[in-house]
Amino acid sequence: MRLNEVTYTGALPIDGYGPGFFRIAGTVHAAPLAVLPSGVTRWGGYDDLAPLLDLAEAMDILFLGTGAEPAHPPRAFREAVEAAGMGLEVMASPPACRTYNVLLSEGRRVGIALMPV
């Protein structure tokens, strides 16, 4: 089997997570949070759309990690993200982190908003 080292060229991968935190590029951050092209920012949950929509032009896809279990976001949240021109992928936070890292390693224009696990 051939293993290749993944490089993120300046982007911020999610290294790990646990109860109430995510480790991003080696630094632990309390959740909820968003990892966007501009960096890591506190995120106030579904009603806090400003940090996500302010960078809509820099992202093609926004991943939404809903915590330990998958859950539907409020309709207003989905409609606002899609109206801003981003695709929205909703899943539990652990698979959202993994999928975000894969697309990030491919150089895709992605962001992620995470609820705590």
Image (cartoon, grey):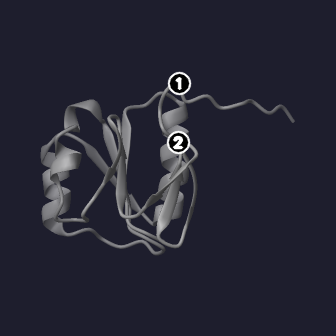
| Residue toward you, 104 or 1 | 104
Please name the residue that numbered disc 2 is placed on: 13
Number of marks:
2
Disc 2 from disc 1: Cα separation: 10 Å
Q: Amino acid at mark 1?
A: Thr
For the N terminus, the quadrant is top right
Q: Nearer the viewer, residue 38 or 7?
A: 38
Front residue (pair 56, 33): 33
Q: Position of residue 61 (x, y in %)?
A: 33, 42
Left or right: residue 6 versus residue 101 is: right
Which residue corresponds to the image point at 47% horizontal and 70% vertical from the top-left? 20
Residue 5 in percent (x, y) is at 72, 30
User: In front: 99, or 48?
Assistant: 48
x, y percentage for residue 107? 47, 27
Q: Residues within 10 Å of mark 2 (few under 14, many from 20)?
A: many
Assess disc 1: are there few (<14), some (14-19) or many (≥20) residues with their C-alpha within 10 Å of its C-alpha.
few
Secondary-structure class at tag 2? loop
Report the residue at 43% width, 69% height from top: 116
The label on residue 60 is none
Element type at mark 1: loop
Tag 1 residue: 9
| Residue at the limit of the structure toward the top, as seen here | 9
Amino acid at the residue labelled 2: Pro
* Residue 62, image x, y percentages: 33, 47
Residue at point 43%, 31% (across, down): 108
Horizontally, residue 94 falls left or right of residue 56, namely right
